[in-house]
Amino acid sequence: TGISAKSASHPVFTNNEVKGNGEYGIMIRMACTPVFEKNKILQNPIGIYTAPSGTAQPDIGGGGRSTGGNEFDNYEWNIYHRGPVDISAKKNSWGSPCCEGIHEKIYDKEDDSLSGTVDVGTCMICTASLSVRPVVNTS
């Protein structure tokens, strides 16, 4: 783990590069309420992990304490949110503007009903599904 934040701490992480760690880039536990702005969280199996016990509530962008500007590009998950509260992660760079690409690397309430939601803000739907009807030859 590159950085571990816990207890009732309120750290502010700005302009850091958290890169190439063995499991987690950043681990957040207990009642920790960190703020993340303008960080590069890259090439970790999991970028940011919030533990299921406690009420950790990071502001990764747009939650009233952070303006975002973080860059994510991790191998398995950019955010693995096991905590029970909803968190904000808006106005960040995810390596893709497409909702599908962003959400496939975020673990939250959609993956586990006991976890809170990670709000990434506005993204683009890039994959559309079309229904195709067969052509009927009436001649």
Image (cartoon, rainbow, N blue to C red):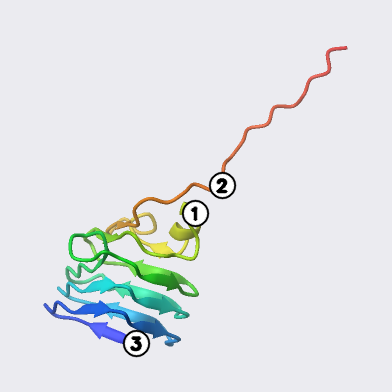
Residue shown at the point (34%, 87%) measured from the top left: 2
Classify 10 Å Cα crowding around label 2: few (below 14), some (14-19), many (20 and above).
few
Question: Image check: 86 left or right of 45?
Answer: left
Three-letter amino acid code at the position of disc 2: Thr
Residue 127: percent from left, percent from top: 56, 47
- State the CA–CA distance, disc 3 to disc 2: 35 Å
Residue kind at label 3, given as amino acid type: Gly
Q: Which residue is mark 2?
A: 127
Q: Is 125 positioned to the left or the right of 136 in the image? A: left
The disc, 3 or 1, on the residue closer to the chain's N-terminal end is 3
> At which x and y percent is residue 8?
11, 77
Give the residue drawn at x 49%, y 54%: 98
Query: Residue at label 3?
Result: 2
Q: Are marks 2 and 1 in contact (CB under 8 Å)?
A: yes
Q: Is residue 25 above or below residue 97?
A: below
Which residue lies at the image location 45% right of the left edge and 78% below the top edge? 45
Label pair 3/1, CB-CB below 8 angstroms: no
Residue 128 at what x, y percent from top left? 57, 42
* Quarter of the image where the N terminus is located: bottom left
Q: CA distance from mark 2 to mark 1?
A: 8 Å
Q: Quadrant of residue 138?
A: top right
Residue sitting at the far top: 139
